[in-house]
Image (tube, helix red, strand yellow):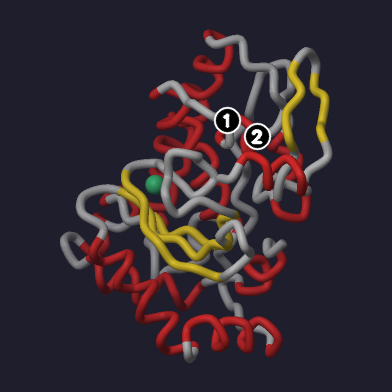
Amino acid sequence: MNRKKFLKQSAMLTVGLAAVPSIALSKKNSPLKNNSLFSSTGFSLPEIPYGYSAFPNVIDSKTMEIHHKKHHNGYTNKLNKACAKENIKTQRIEEILSAKSLSSSIQNNGGGYYNHCLYWDILTPGGSMSKEFDKKITASFGSKESFLNELTQAAKTRFGSGWAWLYQDNDKNLKICSTANQDNPLMQHVKTNGNPLLGIDVWEHAYYLKYQNKRGEYIQNILKIINWEKVENRMI
Ligand SMILES: [Fe+2]
């Protein structure tokens, strides 16, 4: 992200000894809410408000449970260890991930922590786009159908493990991209840098029990349970 612009947009937030910019990271935009804050024990695994069995036709409950309790929890614990080791005092995960350089441990585990928080947050048993957001999507991608096709392609063609994103670039334009592993648009080394709005997990652990090698079917189905209101509310 353009550092000057980043700083210009943001008030400086002083946390402990560290002074870090608070970017597009108003609470409104955080998928983490209160979980974003360090407690005496560090970052915490957010609860899934709709439960593991909310989407029986899209993601089976076993996948949801393993994904949350094992994978996401693993990233959370490793992130806390990395923060302790690197003496990172910053309160917000978004600020940590927006730093100029990241250790591989923070990049992978901090990314894994943030990405999964966002993923759980933007799913819902039923959701639809507001007319206003639909207009913005149409203005940016030609039509809602084109947008969904482009997002689907980004998710389908990501080689190996990674994520597909709807994000705002640094000029606040709506864009689609994919990133490898646990990278995301907050990270400065990611060329498609900006404000993440929607992330689709295309690691095999997100779908393999139900879909095996049919990643396309998983993507098609998960797009039916997006909480578009939350996606829209993340815009800056
Ligand atoms: Fe995942």
Amino acid type assigned to the residue bearing label 1 in the image:
Ala
From mark 1 to mark 2, how far is it between C-alphas? 7 Å
Q: Residue at x 82, y 25 (%)?
A: 14
Confirm or deny contact between disc 1 and disc 2 (CB under 8 A). Answer: yes
- Is 9 situated left or right of 109 in this image? right
Residue 227 screen position, x and y as percent: 60, 70
Residue 214, by quadrant, is bottom left
Against 174, residue 23 (above or below) is above
Amino acid type assigned to the residue bearing label 2 in the image:
Glu
Residue 59, by quadrant, is bottom left
Disc 1 on helix, strand or loop?
loop
Residue 192 screen position, x and y as percent: 45, 54
Against 40, residue 32 (above or below) is below
Q: Residue at x 44, y 29 (%)?
A: 74
Residue 84 screen position, x and y as percent: 58, 11
Q: Nearer the viewer, residue 160 or 69?
A: 160
Q: Nearer the viewer, residue 160 or 47?
A: 160
Q: Quadrant of the N terminus?
A: top right
Residue 126, by quadrant, is bottom right
Disc 2 on helix, strand or loop?
helix
Q: Which residue is mark 1?
A: 99
Spot the residue most to the left.
213
Q: Nearer the viewer, residue 181 or 81?
A: 181
Q: Residue at x 56, y 56 (%)?
A: 196
Against 98, residue 161 (above or below) is below
Q: Quadrant of the C terminus?
A: bottom right
Residue 137 screen position, x and y as percent: 56, 82
Q: Which residue is mark 2?
A: 95
User: Would you call the spot at circle 1 few (<14 residues within 10 Å), some (14-19), or many (20 or more)?
Assistant: some
